[in-house]
Image (cartoon, helix red, strand yellow):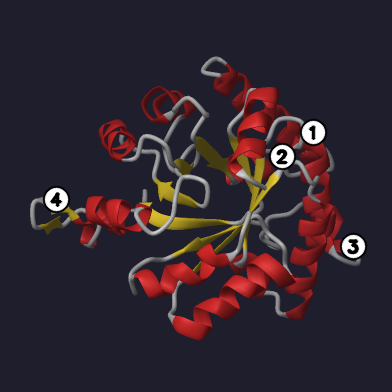
């Protein structure tokens, strides 16, 4: 999906919602455990219930890889079920160099045709460039994350700037706003403002809303740009909103609430 298509979908749905399919076998409703593929059954119901309100789905590959071959099958079935007009993210956080990175890119852009994949930039340009060789695909690079440990490296001084600021500006120069996004945490308004000033045109994938304490108003007021420019990810707060047979209805209601909050800014 290219930038024009993504932006059109954002304004058509008046939403920047990304639903995270971090599907944990220990948390899905017990009645689904009788299904042949419980993970896919859960994901299918969530997608059916929320697709009217979301512009992206993020599949956290760790939850699928942990299940072995069955998990990879569930992931592929889920990816194939997502409507074609909704942006797909492989949250795999890959980061290596040379032909290894090329194979990671092939995995998530060809074998499993996601629109985007998350990448760790610690090893430098040759860990990111292989992902940028795929036309129409996006590389989502870790920039400023919302976890407590982010202060260990990201917030350290690096010359006249903080390390995360150097990473953002350096990585941005390797591609363009049509093929690079950045992961930017949602929990601090001042940092959202700083990052948007540094990168006025790039899209941000923004975790940290809901269970981690961030909120839609803070993100939208401080990080939106003329194209929307953010994808606000909510995982647990939507997919585990209900625990019984009505879990999909509960997810739909939560997704609708988030979409309505976002619509005020779009």
The numbered disc on residue 190 is none
Determine which quarter of the picture holds residue 63: bottom right
x, y percent for residue 231: 54, 39
Q: Are marks 2 and 1 in contact (CB under 8 Å)?
A: yes
- Relative to 94, is 197 on the left or the right? left
Q: Nearer the viewer, mark 2 or mark 1?
A: 1
- Relative to 97, is 251 on the left or the right? right
Q: Tell me the CA gap for discs 4 and 1.
A: 47 Å
Crowding at label 1, few (<14), some or many (≥20) Cα neighbours within 10 Å?
some
The residue lying at 77 percent from left, 44 percent from top is 46
Question: Pointer 2: what residue?
Answer: 242
For residue 161, say whether it is visible: yes
Q: Nearer the viewer, mark 2 or mark 4?
A: 4
In the structure shown, which secondary structural element does the residue marked by tag 2 occupy?
A: loop
In the structure shown, which secondary structural element does the residue marked by tag 4 occupy?
A: strand
Question: Pointer 4: what residue?
Answer: 161
């Amino acid at each position: 999906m290219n930038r024009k298509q993504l932006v059109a979908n954002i304004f058509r749905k008046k939403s920047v919602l990304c639903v995270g399919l971090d599907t944990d076998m220990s948390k899905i409703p017990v009645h689904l455990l009788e299904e042949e593929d419980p993970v896919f059954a859960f994901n299918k119901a969530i997608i059916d219930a929320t697709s009217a309100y979301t512009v992206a789905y993020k599949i956290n590959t760790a939850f699928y890889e942990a299940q072995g071959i069955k998990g990879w099958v569930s992931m592929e079935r889920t990816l194939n079920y997502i409507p074609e007009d909704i942006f797909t993210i492989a949250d795999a956080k890959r980061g290596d160099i040379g032909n290894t990175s090329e194979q990671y890119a092939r995995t998530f852009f060809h074998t499993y045709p996601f629109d985007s994949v998350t990448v760790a930039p610690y090893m430098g340009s040759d860990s990111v460039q292989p992902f940028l060789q795929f036309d129409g695909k996006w590389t989502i690079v870790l920039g400023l994350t919302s976890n407590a440990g982010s202060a260990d490296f990201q917030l350290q001084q690096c010359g006249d700037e903080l390390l995360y600021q150097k990473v953002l500006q350096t990585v941005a120069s390797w591609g363009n706003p049509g093929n690079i996004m950045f992961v930017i945490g949602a929990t601090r308004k001042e940092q959202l403002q700083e990052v948007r000033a540094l990168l006025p045109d790039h899209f941000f994938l923004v975790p940290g809303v809901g269970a981690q304490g961030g909120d839609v108003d803070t993100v939208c007021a401080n990080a939106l740009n003329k194209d929307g420019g953010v994808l606000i990810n909510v995982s647990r707060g939507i997919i585990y909103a209900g625990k019984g047979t009505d879990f999909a209805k509960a997810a739909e209601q939560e997704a609708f609430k988030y979409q309505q909050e976002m619509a005020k800014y779009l």
